[in-house]
Image: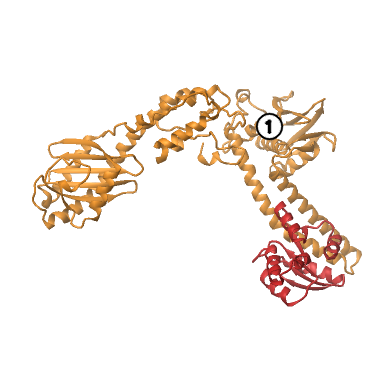
Chain colours: A red, B orange
Amino acid sequence: MNILIIEDEILIQQSLKKLFERKGHKVETTSSGKEAITKIYQFNFDRIICDLMLNDINGFDIIEDCKKKYKSNEISTKFVIITAYSSEGVLDKAKEYGCKLFQKPFDNIHEALDLMIKD
Amino acid sequence: MENKHTSPNENHSKRGLLNLSNSISQSDFFNAQYFKKKISKLSLNKPNKKISFKYNKVSKNKFVLTDEDSFFELIKFLDHYKALKNYNILEILYHRKGELLGQHLSLNSRKQINLKSLEIKDFNYNFNLVRKSKNKYFTSSGLKGITPSFVGTFLANALSTKKDNYIIIISRNDFLPPEKEEISSMNHFCELLLNQVNKLTSKAHALNQSQKTKIILNNFILPIEIINDEKQKIVFTNITTKTHHHHIRKIHNLNKENKIIIFDGLIKTNSSEIHHQERINLLGELLNTLRHEINNPLFGLKLTTDLLLGSKIDIDQKDTLNEIKNNIDRCQNIMGNFSNIYTNTNVIKEVDLYGAIYESKLLAKSEIRQIKFNSTIKKDEFILKTNPTSLIQVFFNLFINSAQAMKNYNQVSQLITITAENSDSSILIKISDNGPGIDQKIKEKIFQPFFTTKENGTGLGLAITNSLVKSLSGTISFYTNNDHSGVTFEIKLPKYI
């Protein structure tokens, strides 16, 4: 599976990358939201794991941008949002886009990772 | 009470809360609309009672010059200028920004003084006229809405200070046009005069203002009269000007805290609760930020540890990594617990007394490090349905209070003993220390806000504790221990709030 990880906390980004690679997936990483958007246009990812609070733009903004570009709602279901904040507003928005939402820290890491890539 | 204390959170609604001392200095204090609004708010709960505010009485209150001799000194300034030696009349038109009327003051060298009120629109018209004029030279018919005390031509200048606008007029009482020299001397004269005039008018203004305040306070008899009516709430505090004092003394005597508190039927507020709520809100915000900032790197560490645990390592390394992982979990738990205490402050839920005491000790750790705790309370032995934030805060405050009392008294074997007893519907918790105890003389005062025996104390700790226990529908009392060592606080809390 082709996975893109968008996360500005490098320690989390690299650990997730290695953990996914160990499970046999191909992983790309970036810490910038804008760079992520160009990468999404270039490559065809099966899963996009995205932190909500990035330095430059918001995770939901990336989804919105992709939806406009592809003129389809399908892309948003490929997204997995990870966040340290999970207010009701965030939860509702994730539901609206049909993407999964995980709150950091995950209690059981391996279980969480499996859930992320499950269809 | 300072203004900021009036809006700490949604519990202390601004409705009906009027802080008089701060309002006095504001210009809108004398605005009739403002008063009618305030008073109609106060009367919300009493629709039958007719309330009228006699605002006209205030606005018609005549402006009085208090120091006429000093004003006459001003005309002597003209003697300093050779070119102005024939000028014997000085008129000062002045308007304080925000006031409803301007003042027109005429002085002449025969020591005659005349003071009239002036419509603002006339003042402004003339002020702009004079300001825009290039040669500052006019004839008496040129002004609108004011009658000067002289005939003929005059020189005028328009000046502003931070609070006031002035038009300064000098005249020789004749029809001759002014010389160039006179005009330039006039400008210099005005600059010299302005500072002096400003001092005098400000002084007069302050005295007149306090006269108005007196009238306003007379009109405020209504809310003062309903002081025993528990349905309405108004807070008057710190009225500093002595001139108001005889109106206020009556109120002072009504309450030990030098303020009147008329309670609203719904929310009871006093200053210690407001202080407390402010502290809690601030802490909640700080802890939330801290939690977010710390949780992210902690989570990174956790993931890395997990990654390492999955690679080929020997048993020693594995133990160390597990130890690291456990410590990360502990940090996350502590952060989570702290911010939960301070964010969900209005939640009622089942609380284990053992856990609440544990959390309080954790919170107070820096103060109580040297103290030995002797607690008979076991896990899951006493369960209450109550507000955990308040409960923890009560214990926290009592621990801190004991710790500070023992600090300078008993350096060696500081001990806090905690016991609890179950009854049908309530739990009785006893917290004793072996500090100096509480002096018989101050026994009555210790739960009062702002009462403290410490040099830098706020006097709020026990006052807050008292109001928190009340908010949990409980009671708190204390007694000196039988062996005369230290004090015991007894808290009785209902099992279900």
User: Could you say where residue B80 lies in the image, as x and y percent from the top left?
Assistant: 15, 49
Pointer 1 residue: B471
**Which quarter of the picture shows residue B365?**
top right
Q: Identify residue type, mark 1.
A: Ser
User: Could you say where residue B422 lies in the image, as x and y percent from the top left?
Assistant: 82, 28
| Relative depth, front residue between A96 and B101 | A96
Observer able to see residue B4: yes
On screen, residue A25 above or below B134 = below
| Relative depth, front residue between B447 and A40 | A40
Dot 1 surroundings within 10 Å: few (below 14), some, or many (20 or more)? some
User: Could you say where residue B329 lies in the image, as x and y percent from the top left?
Assistant: 80, 54
Residue at (24%, 43%) from the top-left corner?
Answer: B93
Is A38 positioned to the left or the right of B309 in the image? Answer: left
Is B196 positioned to the left or the right of B153 in the image? Answer: right
Observer able to see residue B25: no
Is B449 positioned to the left or the right of B326 in the image? Answer: left
Q: Chain of mark 1?
A: B
Kindly state the secondary structure of the residue where label 1 is placed. Answer: helix
Disc tally is 1
